[in-house]
Amino acid sequence: MAKASPIQPEWIESTLFAQHHIRAIFTLRRGGISQPPFDSQNFGIGLGDPDANINENLRTFIRASALPSTPHQAIQIHQTSTLWCNGSGSSHPNEADILLSDQPDTPLAVRTADCLPILLADPNTGITAAAHAGWRGTASNVAEHAIQNMCERGAKKADILASLGPCIGPCCFQIGEEAATALKNCTPSASEFVDNCADLRQINRLQLLQCGLTDTNIELINACTACDNKRFFSFRRDAGQTGRHIAVVAIASKP
Ligand SMILES: [Zn+2]
């Protein structure tokens, strides 16, 4: 009997972080076992996909990507509250759109399907953060909150690396007046990237520059989740019936 071909989880890995021996990974939708409309590498719990599928997707992904342990996750509510984490992770009952750690072997993850995942790391102190930025989080300066929290534990703004992952692009992200007004006012020059549509990636980049990060330490993964049905889940394109990606940052302890 022919053996079923092994499932190969797919992801995009940050080249900027890799230069510093830090993992920053954005999963793609292919390479899991979930069935439509969650096909197939879904990490979103409570959406209708059986938990057993999500747990299997996670196990397969951790093994294939050689992450040091299970990522920490929290309940995301489009705000700026934080959760400091340590060691091997789980899905916490806490509400937090910013996960942080100052320990190695502590992968941090946010879930997205159009919102912008922001991964941050200071290679010198080993402080990491993962933030979830939709338009509400962006308008609340979630990126700046993440940086402030990192710096309170000793990270230096000029050293912090940022990778801004796949999200809905300005080609597809039509917004209403409330969102437009909030986004235009969240950081200087943001209005350049807001009209009927908004560019979440560029607005968050401006916020990080405004915080004191350097342009060379900010990486943009220029992919639109709504345009690319093959690689990405998109909440807006799929009218809410879709899976979730995870974006994971992790520093492994030195051998
Ligand atoms: Zn698009």
Image (cartoon, helix red, strand yellow):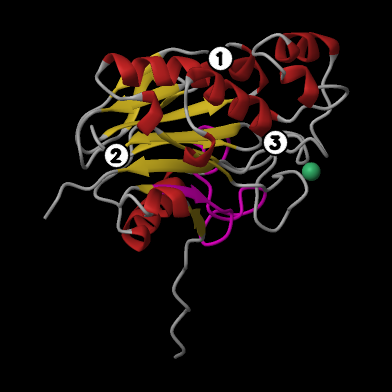
Q: Is residue 15 above or below residue 93?
A: below
Structural distance between the alpha carbons of marks 3 and 2: 33 Å
Q: Tell me: 95 left or right of 143.
A: left
Element marked by disc 1:
loop
Horizontal and vertical percent for residue 36? 66, 52
Q: Is residue 4 above or below residue 28?
A: below
Seen from the viewer's position, the closer of residues 101 and 244 is: 101
Q: Which image quadrant is residue 242 in?
A: top right
Residue identifier under label 3: 235
Element marked by disc 3:
loop
The numbered disc on residue 123 is: 2
Name the mark nearer the viewer: 3 or 2. Answer: 2
Residue identifier under label 1: 141
Q: Earlier in the sequence, mark 3 or mark 2?
A: 2
- Magenta stretch? 24-49
Task: Check disc 2: other Cα within 10 Å, few if <14, some if 14-19, many if 20+.
Answer: some
Q: Which image quadrant is residue 149 in?
A: top left
Tell me how many marks there are: 3
Image quarter in which the C terminus is found: bottom left
